[in-house]
Amino acid sequence: MTVDLGRIGIWSRELRYNPDPGARAAAAAELEDLGYQAIFIPDAGGDVLGAVGHLLAATRRVPFATGVLNIWMHDPAEVARWRASLLARFGPRFLLGLGNSHAPLVESALGVPYARPYAKMTAYLDALDEAEPPVPAPMRDAGCPRSADAVAGVDEVRRAAPVAGAEGTRRGQRRDPVRQRHAPGLGHSGIV
């Protein structure tokens, strides 16, 4: 089972953070009526999956994705349970977009050091695989390459990383071991 995000999607901060839940629901329904094929909402902590559920309930067919869920701020077992609940209530209309966030946000909001983001993502994906119920790879995205050319870029970074002493770069992170464990399509921006 996969989530079809279509070709035209929209990312909206207001669908997540507008203080009026009725306005958020009405806006999501209007975006669906206008023909948008996917809606992405951001996460900087808080109940992002509750917000997704609220928006799914306000619409009939448009899929939603987190663009992206901050893996430092959400327990993977809890995320897996929420995803299963959304699937049971709304069918396959939700894609779990995952991301490592940014050091200043993680360190200021959580008071923990932002270190080894690649290892953190790998551990998070492992936890989603082991959760009950698990989150299948086609129902999540961790920013994988979109094409053979992008994969070639990952290979170049893999070869260069030992020399540079780095896990990757912003434009071509070493994601190859993770690549087969999540759904293709979102890339870094979360915007289709």
Image (tube, helix red, strand yellow):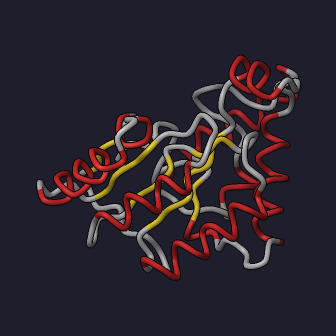
Residue at the image position 59 percent from the left and 38 percent from the top: 153
Residue for point 57% across, 56% down: 141
Q: Where residue 61 sits: x, y (%)? A: 27, 71
Horizontal and vertical percent for residue 40? 40, 48
Percent of width and height locating residue 134: 73, 75
Q: Is residue 153 above or below residue 59?
A: above
Report which quarter residue 79 is drawn in.
bottom right
Examine the image and state in which quarter residue 77 appears. bottom right
* Left or right of 165 in this view: 103: left
Q: Is residue 74 above or below residue 80?
A: above
Residue 33: x and y, percent?
13, 59
Q: As rendered, which of 112 and 46 lies closer to the eye?
A: 46
The reply, left or right, for residue 6 in relation to residue 119 is left
Looking at the image, which residue is at 60% across and 68% down? Answer: 83
Camera-side residue of 144 and 189: 189
Tell me which corner region of the image, top left, top right, bottom left or bottom right, holds residue 17.
top left
In the image, residue 51 sits, relative to residue 89, either above or below, namely above
Outermost residue, left direction? 34
Label total for image: 0
Q: Residue at x 59, y 44 (%)?
A: 152
